[in-house]
Amino acid sequence: MLTLVKDNTINLIEIFSSVQGETHLSGLPTVFVRTAACNLRCTWCDTNYSFGRGTPTTIDSIVKEVEEAGLPHVCITGGEPLLQKNIHQLMSILCDRGYTVSIETGGSLPINNIDARVITILDIKCPGSGMESKNLWENIKNLRPHDEIKFVILDRNDYDYTKKVIEKYHLKNRKHPVLLSPVHDELESKQLVEWILEDKLPVRLNLQLHKFIWTPQTRGV
């Protein structure tokens, strides 16, 4: 049972509605709750504006804003949401209210306490991110069938690294194919597709739709 804490705030960067740009939920209208702070510094990070302290916001206020948006899907993102001590409480409340909830986490913090109803998107860091040493490998065994794994690919070295991890941890047999995302404006998606086809790798190309609909620099989308 979740223990309620006296301070029920979450440090928040923004809440906005858009279409989900990634994962098997891609294209679905979604409310995004972006939390503040991150314990990683990936070389290709596109949300470094979330590194600050953010605004302390009560869980009730966040839930109210989500309800006012009127969309069935909620994505908890950051920053690194798992740095927020009350994020588990927020996710459980949203699940209780019937929302489909997903969380995007950088893979350096334990995921074992995430509500079983939440879809965890685990981002395994490749060498090109500069954060490879931060991967918490025990997270893989704590993934549920509906969870997903993502690799952000900067170059061929990252791709080869990804293949080794997929083989080592038997990730080919998961319900949802592993997601491979080329770093936008750094690796051409066509090049990544050619590597995937050459190796007949059973993965899903994971393009960030919002960067094609709007500009890569546009916030709140």
Image (spheres, helix red, strand yellow):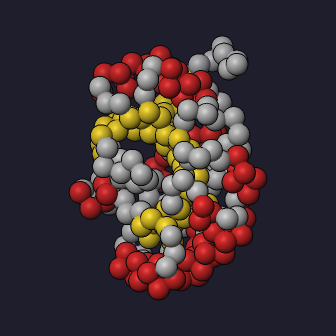
Quadrant of the snapshot with the N terminus: top right
Q: Does residue 168 appear left or right of residue 214 in this picture?
A: right
Residue drawn at x 72%, y 51% as measured from the top left: 141
Q: How many marks?
A: 0
Residue drawn at x 47%, y 86% as measured from the top left: 198
User: Against 191, is 96 above or below?
Assistant: above
Between 138 and 220, which is closer to the camera in this rendering? 138
User: Against 172, is 191 above or below?
Assistant: below
Instruction: Locate residue 163, reporting x and y percent.
Output: 61, 75
Instruction: Locate residue 84, reporting x and y percent.
Output: 61, 34
Residue 36 visible in the picture = no
Residue drawn at x 43%, y 23% as measured from the top left: 98
Between 166 and 80, which is closer to the camera in this rendering? 166
Q: Does residue 49 appear left or right of residue 221 in this picture?
A: right
- Residue located farthest toward the bottom when viewing the structure as drawn: 198
Q: Quadrant of residue 185?
A: bottom left
Instruction: Locate residue 50, reporting x and y percent.
Output: 49, 46
Residue drawn at x 50%, y 25% as measured from the top left: 95
Instruction: Locate residue 63, reporting x and y percent.
Output: 43, 21
User: Against 130, is 102 above or below?
Assistant: above
Residue 23 visible in the picture = yes
